[in-house]
Image (tube, rainbow, N blue to C red):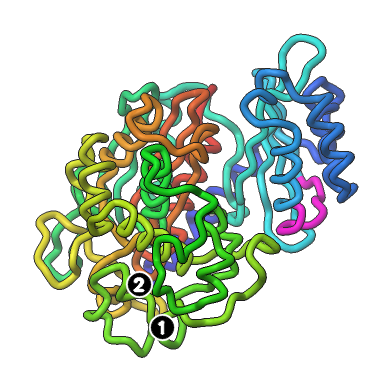
Amino acid sequence: MKALIFLSILCLLLTLCLAQEKSETIFPDTPEGKLAASYLKAYNSGEDQAMMEFFRNRVTPEALGRSSAEERTARYRQLYNRLGALELRRVFPSPDGSLRTLMRSKNGGSFTFEFDVERTPPHRMVRLMVDQADDQNLSLSRKRNRAELVQAVEAFVDSLVAADVFSGVVLIAKDGSVFFHKPYGLADRERRIPNRPDTKFNLGSINKSFTKVAIYQLAAKGKLSLDDPIKKHIPDYPNTEAAEKVTIKHLLDMTSGIGDFFGQRYMSTPKEKLRSIRDYFPLFADMPLQFQPGTGQRYSNGGYIVLGAIVEAAAGTDYYTYVRENIFKPAGMNSSESYEKDKPVPNRALGYTRRGGTSWQTNYETLPAKGSSAGGGFSTAEDMLRYTRALKTGVLYNPDAEGGMGIAGGAPGINAFLDWDPSSDEVIVVLANLDPPAAERVARQIRMWLPR
């Protein structure tokens, strides 16, 4: 009952906050308003050529140098296929040359589109950031300074903790310097052990980013090529068609047609048997492809298991050792590892889920004995910050992160979010040991509030 009261108060406060924000329902007659209107018109046309012309004519040469008009159009097609047409719901002008909008997707859900525009003619687009905004009570106006941000974050997270919907760690950094780092809630509810700033949390699918780095490292060393088919590295792969047709690039981009390993087989498999990468193969590898490689795109945990097995074959060592020696150690991520769930680990947060009930229950029974190349490793907030530093300085390389990172992991009792904007060098890390969207809700609100 107390949780319901706190949630009601929280929703009321956030709704009042949102209502007080200065917003419009039409684009303003300003350079950034005109550019955003032009973008929405091209987007809603559903035509690649219209978007191509927008990118070529309305984006700065510097931005096109980082990502070409052709690459942007390909991403537009993926976005349009997922969201459908957009309807403008609210506009939040800013004096800093940016314009934040709230859009409603035809296919369901709300999203923020933020346009950064040149302050001088011809007022072209510098950057576009798109983010999900499922929580309709998000406050979209930026805070004026760091002190105001910290005050707002503390009040917001405190209210979530009081409502028993957040437990974890929040970290915010600028230019590599941490200015907010606080733990909340309990790492172990039964023994009443609180979370600490250096508590280790399950990252869920964020581990896929480490798998990508491993693949690109091995490609740079000539150990593999992104065009290699699976069979070159895994001759005994159970699905002959997939082994011959699916390439490493397909696996990275989730265009392989290989499905997920979560399902009936996973549910009926004793989780203690899942301790190595190949232990996951019987859960999915013999299944038919969901579509021909390269003709579609679908989230695939199975595909990243295959990537982990390819890392092992190309590197000549097990996946966990490779990641530890070639990613975690060079980055200084000394508190990151894939732990076995049935072995004691100091300062590790236990996960808690409400799925299947109304009270928090441990997620132990849903977890494999050990995480994999698709997810399930552990890390700390500071180690995730170190990961972004390693990418920024070139210690680690992931071309997909050149424009920044906004990655999340989530499962029963697990939610983690890493947000890094290289242009402003701002990092947000939120790790939680509760069901999604515990961490994502906090990270998205912080991103909305970041001052310019």
Mark identifier at residue 166: none
Q: Residues within 10 Å of mark 2 (few under 14, many from 20)?
A: many
Is residue 2 toward the left or the right of residue 93 in the image? left
Type of amino acid under label 2: Thr
Q: Residue farthest to the top? A: 120
Is residue 288 toward the left or the right of residue 97 in the image? left
Viewer-proximal residue among 424 and 233: 233
Q: Which residue is mark 2?
A: 353
Quadrant in the rendering for residue 96: top right
Q: Position of residue 213 (x, y in %)?
A: 39, 44
Q: Residues within 10 Å of mark 1 (few under 14, many from 20)?
A: few
- Residue 82 inside the magenta-drawn segment: yes
Quadrant in the rendering for residue 393: top left
- Residue 267 inside the magenta-drawn segment: no
Q: Position of residue 111 (x, y in %)?
A: 67, 49
Mark identifier at residue 356: 1
Chain part drawn in magenta: 80-89
Can see residue 432?
no
Q: Is residue 367 above or below residue 38?
A: below
Q: Position of residue 262 (x, y in %)?
A: 44, 77
Q: Pointers 1 and 2 in contact (CB under 8 A)?
A: yes
The local secondary structure at tag 1 comes to loop
